[in-house]
Amino acid sequence: MQWRNWSELESAEPREVRSPATPDDVVSAVVASREARTTVKMVGTGHSFTGIASPDDVMLRPDRLSGIVSVDRDAMTVTAYAGTQLKDLNAGLERLGLSLHNMGDIAEQTLAGAVSTGTHGTGGIAAGLAAQLAGFELVTGTGELVAASASQNADLFMLGRVGLGALGILTTVTFAVEPLFLLEAHEQPMTWDEALGSFDAMVGESHHCDMYWFPHTDRMLTKRNTRLDADLTEAEPVGALRGWVDDELLSNTVFGILTAAANRMPRVIPRMNQLSARALSARTYSDVAHRVFTSPRRVVFREMEYAVPREAGLDALREARRVVDDSDWRISFPVEIRVAPADDVALSTAYDRDSFYLAFHTHHRSDWRTHTSYLEAMETIMRAHDGRPHWGKLHTRTASDLAPAYPRFEEFLALRDRLDPDRLFANAYLRRVLGA
């Protein structure tokens, strides 16, 4: 069986495939791999652009390790199997009248994959999914099922919430949750100067704020989400027709057709971006949180994202635009801009500092030379601003230059040595970013 990730950049042909249904099944698979001296990886839905989950020998599928396990309304926590997709957790939480505090803009990932790679949203008290964890269980490289929380195996909890799949195979994750709440979204096109000039104010006045810059234009789309102190019955979601037109027809079908065609005629991209950006109109709507946070993404792309210190963010963005404007690249995808509060998750891109995220995308069929030179140039800028790369998105960093970016990197490596001494969970990507 061949495994391939969503962006079609990574593939593998594992020698054996298993579908564990319980944590004990995962233990059995790990013990068998250790005895056979093979590697073993639990894959997710392939939404990482890197090879972080690429399986060499034994591949574990997450499909049967799915669903909510328990709810503790006194502690306000929910435990789910790690193979659960985020969209299914969101639906289950909604039925329970509960919600995560924050999340990113897609919901296809498994919980294990999203947590382990540092997936995050924008704004809020906590932006990253890992920062919302109250605990987890994993199977170590020695075949032990270990639970971790702030009060149990606290060193593992502090170091392993973003674990990269290098410390063990997650079987369950426990999130801190909140009562289900409404978000009001206000989407508004702006000029570049208007958006950058008001960005700090928008962030300060909104619970969640992000922006999208259309390369080769002077146009931005801003999105501000504000929590409503209102009954759930007072939601005013986007109407079915407009939602289909905006989010399915235009943002996916038409955008997919246009960007695919533009790959064959890249000279039209600047004009296409101008028309697309000017066609946007303002809209305001409200709905339960996860339906405002997330949206469908059906056009396949490739992505690099960096977190720079919050105070350096706008300068990094301006520099990125100068380089794009001075180039002969033709970039059809917007640049996404988000912010996050500092957290205490050791390998989180927001560890110990407020962060400003810049995400650079290309169509998956775009000219490879343009794709490569564009991302290389953007990475050079981000590194100059002390940027940290998203673990699940494209970058060229290695263990030697990542270590200085994370104060607890050496502690993480020591924990890896203890939990996976035989490197059952290693693959090419982990050897690059963590060392042998």
Image (cartoon, helix red, strand yellow):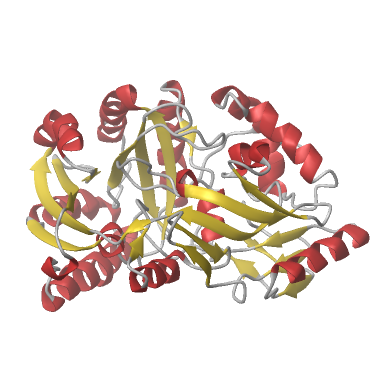
Q: In this view, does 115 lie to the left or right of 99?
A: right
Q: Where is residue 304 in the image (x, y as percent from the top left)?
A: 44, 44
Q: Where is residue 354 in the image (x, y as percent from the top left)?
A: 37, 29
Quadrant location of the C terminus in the rendered image: top right
Indicate whether 221 appears above or below 396.
Answer: below
Q: In this view, does 324 lie to the left or right of 152?
A: left
Indicate whether 381 appears above or below 163.
Answer: above
Q: Which residue is drawn at 54% across and 44% down?
A: 391
Q: Residue at x 17, y 46 (%)?
A: 222
Residue occupying the far front of the picture: 74
Q: Where is residue 279 in the image (x, y as percent from the top left)?
A: 9, 58
Quadrant location of the N terminus in the rendered image: bottom right
Q: In this view, does 83 lie to the left or right of 75?
A: right
Residue 27 found in image quarter: bottom right
Residue occupying the far right of the picture: 35
**How many numbered marks appear?**
0
Q: Where is residue 380 in the image (x, y as percent from the top left)?
A: 45, 28
For the question of whether residue 113 can be seen, the reply is yes
Q: Which of 23 and 264 is in front in this view?
A: 23
For the question of whether residue 51 can be seen, the reply is no
Q: Residue at x 18, y 49 (%)?
A: 226
Q: Which of 284 and 145 is in front in this view?
A: 145
Q: Which of 156 and 111 is in front in this view?
A: 156
